[in-house]
Amino acid sequence: MSADPSEQATPKNKAFAFLAIRLTIGLLLLMIIGARSNGRFLPTSYVVTGGVAATIALIIALGVYSFYYLRARVPDYDPSMLLVVPLAFLPFVIYAWIFGASAFINGFPDIYTRIFGDQGIRQVTTTSRTGQSRGRHVACDGAYIAEIPDWLGRLCLDKRVDAGEPLILRGRHSALGFHVDSIDTGQ
């Protein structure tokens, strides 16, 4: 008995499947790298700007790669697929934005700073405090500080602090940012 031709995998379906698998693996790697920053990294403003630009470049590269990958592997490629491909890969674009920004703003710079950074001390001031929650893969009390944009998250603390309280951060610093090893209250 032969299988029904409509049930067999077409080159188009295989191409979409392989592309989805490749994109998923790449995004998972970015997620792992971004997760390496455990809420104790303060990126510089240049890293934030560069990270956003790198994330946008990543999304554009994913779109171009997807277009040329499908065009090369689908024999009956139809230009009307230009409308279908962006919709089919919209979840990948969203995940690329989230994981790419995390990896480019926190992950890569934090790893670099931990390895190549010099010992340093930095004073910051809290703008508001959050209760204990599970954020950035660790349970911690958190505080928003002026040196980190709120949309990037909060600094994980070992103890509760009030808004406006100065903190003395000890850790490693580089041109990319500051990785916090210990935190003391400024009082």
Image (spheres, helix red, strand yellow):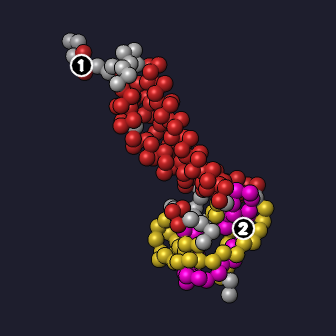
Left of 128 or right of it: where is 183? Answer: right
Q: Position of residue 159 (x, y in %)?
A: 57, 79
Give the residue drawn at x 51%, y 30%: 65
Left of 67 or right of it: where is 13? Answer: left
User: 10 or 164, which is in the foreground?
Assistant: 164
Instruction: Give the residue furthest to the bottom.
Output: 187
Q: Position of residue 69 (x, y in %)?
A: 48, 25
Count the numbered circles shown: 2
**The disc label shown at residue 6, or none:** 1
- Residue numbers of the magenta segment: 154-180
What's the amino acid at mark 2?
Gly
Say which label, 2 or 1, has the lower sequence index: 1
What's the amino acid at mark 1?
Ser
Is residue 160 a member of the stretch shown in magenta? Answer: yes
- The residue that disc 2 covers is 171
Residue 144 versus residue 91 in the image, above or below: below
Instruction: Give the residue furthest to the right.
Output: 118
Is residue 86 a member of the stretch shown in magenta? Answer: no
Q: Position of residue 155 (x, y in %)?
A: 58, 69
Residue 107 visible to an observer of this rendering = no
Left of 10 or right of it: where is 120? Answer: right
Left of 178 or right of it: where is 17? Answer: left
Give the residue drawn at x 59%, y 66%: 148
User: Circle 1 sits in a helix, a strand or a loop, which is it?
Assistant: helix
User: 58 or 4, which is in the foreground?
Assistant: 58
- Binning the other alpha carbons within 10 Å of mark 1 as few (below 14), some (14 to 19) or many (20 upward) gives few
Residue 130 visible to an observer of this rendering = yes
